[in-house]
Image (tube, helix red, strand yellow):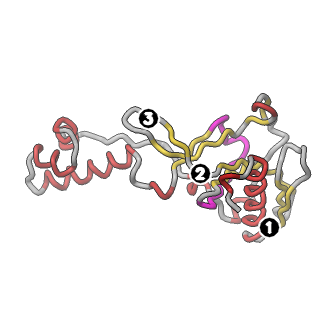
């Protein structure tokens, strides 16, 4: 079976079953809920039942950026219903499980920690994002400068414009570091579910 050709309902079901399997292998009781409820999975953490809404994406999407396009997992989290016209109320859902089917990665966030739409970086692309490459180039530029390389040489070695190489070698320069997260950053250990 090819997931790419499956309809949205099938993709959603695959995500729900993957979440149940993940929670069961963590030592919990978890099962799919009935259709039509505001949550997809019920988790028994030993002290209470937790309602989990599952959001599933098949693969990363291209997101245009200033310098070049980027790939990330995009989740439309807080909206539900036809045309995403309604919002989940706080009492309807305790947790959201964000599933990337291509990598079988599942991240969990409490309802209170979510925005309407969330983007997460792809672990397979770690180190290739613009800000990450900038930090790597900065570290390398400092090392090359310490070796006595000229700014022109640093520029050529790093494959960056002369002005960028110059900025990286000036005392006090700090490279831009994004607050972007990877989906794997919100994978959770069993203890996390006990404190929800």
Q: Which region shows up in magenta?
A: 103-117
At a point 58% along the width and 53% down the height, the residue shown is: 183
At a point 81% along the width and 44% down the height, the residue shown is: 93
Q: How far apart are marks 3 and 2 (CA)?
A: 18 Å
The residue to which callout 3 is attached is 65
**Viewed as shown, does residue 195 lie left or right of 135?**
right
**Viewed as shown, does residue 40 lie left or right of 123?**
right
**Viewed as shown, does residue 182 lie left or right of 80?**
left
Residue 20 location (% of width, % of height): 78, 62
Residue 144 — which label? none
Residue 76 location (% of width, % of height): 67, 38
Indicate which disc, 1 or 3, sits on the residue closer to the N terminus: 1
Mark 2 lies on a secondary structure that is loop
Q: How many marks?
A: 3
The residue to which callout 2 is attached is 59
Indicate which disc, 1 or 2, sits on the residue closer to the N terminus: 1
At a point 8% along the width and 47% down the height, the residue shown is: 150
Indicate which disc, 3 or 2, sits on the residue closer to the N terminus: 2
**Crowd band around label 2 with a 10 angstrom C-alpha radius: few (<14), some (14–19), many (20+):** some
Seen from the viewer's position, the closer of residues 69 and 183 is 69
Q: How far apart are marks 1 and 3 (CA)?
A: 41 Å
Seen from the viewer's position, the closer of residues 175 and 21 is 21
The residue to which callout 1 is attached is 28
Residue 53 location (% of width, % of height): 78, 48
**Crowd band around label 3 with a 10 angstrom C-alpha radius: few (<14), some (14–19), many (20+):** few
**Crowd band around label 1 with a 10 angstrom C-alpha radius: few (<14), some (14–19), many (20+):** some
Image quarter of residue 16: bottom right
Q: In this view, does 85 lie above or below 131?
A: above
Mark 1 lies on a secondary structure that is loop
Q: Does the magenta run of residues contain 184? A: no
Mark 3 lies on a secondary structure that is loop
Does the residue at mark 1 contact the one at mark 2 (Cβ under 8 Å)?
Answer: no
């Amino acid at each position: 079976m090819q997931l790419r050709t499956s309809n949205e309902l099938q993709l959603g079901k695959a995500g729900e079953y993957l979440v149940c399997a993940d929670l069961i292998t963590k030592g919990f009781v978890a099962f799919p809920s009935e259709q039509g409820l505001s949550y997809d999975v019920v988790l028994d953490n030993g002290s209470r039942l937790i309602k989990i809404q599952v959001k599933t994406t098949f693969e990363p999407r291209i997101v245009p950026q200033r310098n070049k396009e980027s790939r990330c997992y995009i989740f439309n989290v807080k909206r539900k219903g036809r045309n995403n016209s309604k919002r989940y109320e706080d009492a309807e859902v305790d947790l959201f499980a964000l599933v990337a089917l291509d990598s079988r990665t599942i991240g969990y966030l409490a309802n209170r920690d979510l925005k309407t739409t969330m983007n997460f970086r792809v672990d397979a692309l770690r180190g290739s994002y613009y800000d990450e490459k900038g930090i790597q180039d900065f570290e390398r530029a400092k090392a090359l400068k310490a070796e006595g390389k000229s700014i022109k040489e640093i520029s050529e070695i790093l494959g960056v414009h002369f002005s960028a190489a110059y900025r990286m070698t000036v005392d006090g320069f700090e490279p831009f570091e994004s607050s972007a997260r990877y989906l794997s950053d919100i994978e959770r250990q069993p203890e996390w579910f006990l404190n929800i």
